[in-house]
Image (cartoon, rainbow, N blue to C red):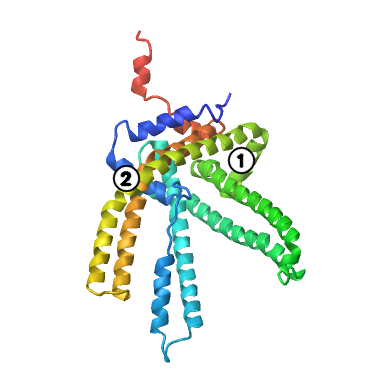
Amino acid sequence: MPLSAVEVVSPAFERMKSHLFKPFRLGQWLRLALVGFLAGEMGQSGGCSVRLPLEILSERSNQLQGPLGPPRGALFFVIVVLAFLLLLVLGIIFAYINSRMRFVLFDSIVNGECRIRDFWRRRSAPAFSYFLFQILLSVIGVLSVSVILGIPLFIAFTLGWFRNPGQHILGFVLGGIILFVVFFIWVVTMVLVQVLTKDFVVPQMAIDGVSVSEGWSRLWPMMKQNQGAYAGYVGMKLLLVIAGAVITGIASFAAMILLLIPFGGIGLVAFLMGRAAGMGWNPVTIAIAVVFATIAILTLIFLVCLIAVPSIVFFPAYAYYFFAERHPALRALLYPPPPESDVSALSPQP
């Protein structure tokens, strides 16, 4: 009988310990931190605000606009378009790296050794297929959000609710509740598709060489026949993710406080020295501030990745051990037969 979602916690935890602590290898830890970050295994915690730099840039652009300069609206439009194109290109590049690293992480968990260069070369075809799937899913997500938000706004605008909003408070409240429920269902659906794909479809792509669609065509009947087991997996993983996020969050917060001491002290001293010297915000000081802030943010991300390495190893291992009970080829990789020398040693001597 296949192991349940609760029962596979133990072998996943043991594999995590054997990967990281038996023995402890700093190089392995650093490589897994990099792979986990690029594979998107860090989750969606935290964020960085860019409000202050944008405000400074806006103020400087207003000061630089003279009789010969472009209109404020045109400059703002150009900046927005360029920023959007830059983010789009960076997003596509990161999605490709993320897709390749997802398979590097798979091979690292299965083999018990993280060799980025070797594993990067192994599965370019399935990784590219997974990359196309992620792009398609992103496009579907943007279009579906546009529909979910656009249709109610269009209906409210057509009915004239925005001209006299005070007379349509009940409609806005009821419509907001319905919109929230629909949007919540959409978020849950998108998250489940992403999680189930990387947990159960990616192993099929890596082992069997199938596409994303074929992997889902195999997975869907399994889920329908074992709804309770897969529902238990989703629920158990949610609880484990919450527990892991709390532990990692506390450790990351402590690391952030320790990091703020040197960086905050250096930044404060530089700021006070600049004020004493009569320096204000100009392109040079803005560039220095941006570089300093970037170094601080990258250092913080690096520390958080190092702290999160146990989670980076445990959660994929948990998914693979659960799915291995339903996929014989994956089970053979996770439970390899003992070496021939061990077998001969255990066999009775004549």
User: The residue under label 2 is which amino acid type?
Assistant: Leu
Q: Mark 2 and mark 1: span between their CA atoms? A: 33 Å
Of 302 and 76, which appears nearest the observer? Answer: 76
Q: Position of residue 54 (x, y in %)?
A: 42, 70
Decide if residue 32 is in sight here. no
- The residue under the point 35% across, 38% down is 113
Q: Mark 1: which secondary structure?
A: helix
Q: Position of residue 80 (x, y in %)?
A: 49, 73
- The residue under the point 50% across, 78% down is 77
Q: How many C-alpha atoms fall within 10 Å of the one at disc 2: few (<14), some, or many (≥20)?
A: some
Label ID, residue 134: none
Please name the residue that numbered disc 1 is placed on: 219
Please name the residue that numbered disc 2 is placed on: 30
Q: Position of residue 207 (x, y in %)?
A: 49, 41
In the image, taking residue 296 as reference, residue 331 lies left or right, namely right
User: The residue under label 1 is which amino acid type?
Assistant: Leu
Q: Mark 2: which secondary structure?
A: helix
Of 8 and 246, which appears nearest the observer? Answer: 246
* Quadrant position of the C terminus in the picture: top left
Where residue 311 sits, quadrant-wise, is top left
